[in-house]
Amino acid sequence: KAGVTQTPRYLIKTRGQQVTLSCSPISGHRSVSWYQQTPGQGLQFLFEYFSETQRNKGNFPGRFSGRQFSNSRSEMNVSTLELGDSALYLCASNYSENYGYTFGSGTRLTVV
Amino acid sequence: KNQVEQSPQSLIILEGKNCTLQCNYTVSPFSNLRWYKQDTGRGPVSLTIMTFSENTKSNGRYTATLDADTKQSSLHITASQLSDSASYICVVNDRGSTLGRLYFGRGTQLTVWP
């Protein structure tokens, strides 16, 4: 069965712009969570959605936002991009916590 | 403060040798602990997941152990292969009655040399 699909795979933006990343979870998975991964900070939790509702949020500024659609697909938006936002953004979905999270391959965002 | 600490930060071993990676956590309440393998530039791939009542879980040449009393876990890799070169990340879920959130270690970078 198809895994978690993230698009685009790579993205280059300039400071001040905004960006929208997309994540399609595994069919049947209703939970989608987003993470930022940088060499200095490792993986950091951004937020989690379940049935179109944000259930949990990490310690990121309000420039980072997300949403989930009725088909469980999710988008993440970053406004007013900063150089420090350059990172690998990962999306993960799961059916139930004890079944584990499945990660997508990520979107590599570079802000110049 | 909920934290997950992994050691060593990096490790180099020769092909065919065994190795053990460590994970200590302070996350509470504890729900489950997972080990992921992440190849460079790719998303993490789940290796094992263990709940409070499980002490050991194997996935091929990977064996994870969990001591919930001391809040320690280890990942043992047997007969290493070049393809085992990756970052290994320990993740702890603090779920209470909701989906909870995940706490990530910074990973151990394993390099297997021929």
Image (cartoon, grey):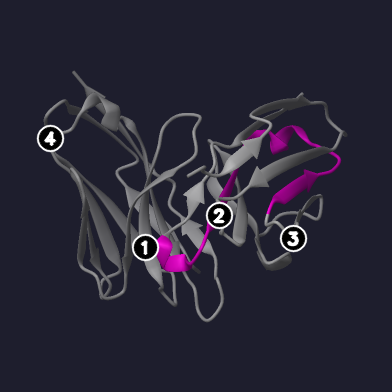
Q: Is residue A89 visible?
A: no
Residue nearest the viewer, comparing B66 with B9: B66
Q: Is residue A37 visible?
A: yes
Q: Which mark is residue B33?
A: 1
Select label 3 or label 1 by which is in front. 3
Q: Which residue is mark 2?
A: A93
Q: Secondary structure at mark 3?
A: loop
The chain letter for the residue carrying disc 4 is B
- Cα distance between the residues tagged 1 and 2: 16 Å
Question: Measured from the top left, where is residue B47 in percent x and y?
Answer: 32, 49
Mark 4 burial class by Cα count in 10 Å: few <14, some 14-19, many 20+: some
Q: Quadrant of residue A33?
A: bottom right
Q: Are marks 2 and 4 in contact (CB under 8 Å)?
A: no
Question: Measured from the top left, where is residue B16 in percent x and y?
Answer: 11, 29
- Cα distance between the residues tagged 2 and 3: 15 Å
Q: Secondary structure at mark 2?
A: strand
Q: Amino acid at mark 2?
A: Ser
Q: Which residue is mark 4?
A: B79
Question: Measured from the top left, where is residue B33 in percent x and y?
Answer: 36, 62
Asked if badges 4 and 1 are on one and the same chain, I answer: yes
Q: Which residues lie in the magenta part?
A: A73-99
Q: Residue at x 29, y 43 (%)?
A: B8
Report the side of A79 relative to A30 (left or right).
right
Mark 3 burial class by Cα count in 10 Å: few <14, some 14-19, many 20+: few
Q: Earlier in the sequence, mark 2 or mark 3?
A: 3
Q: Which mark is residue B44?
A: none
Q: Which residue is mark 3?
A: A70
Q: Secondary structure at mark 4?
A: loop
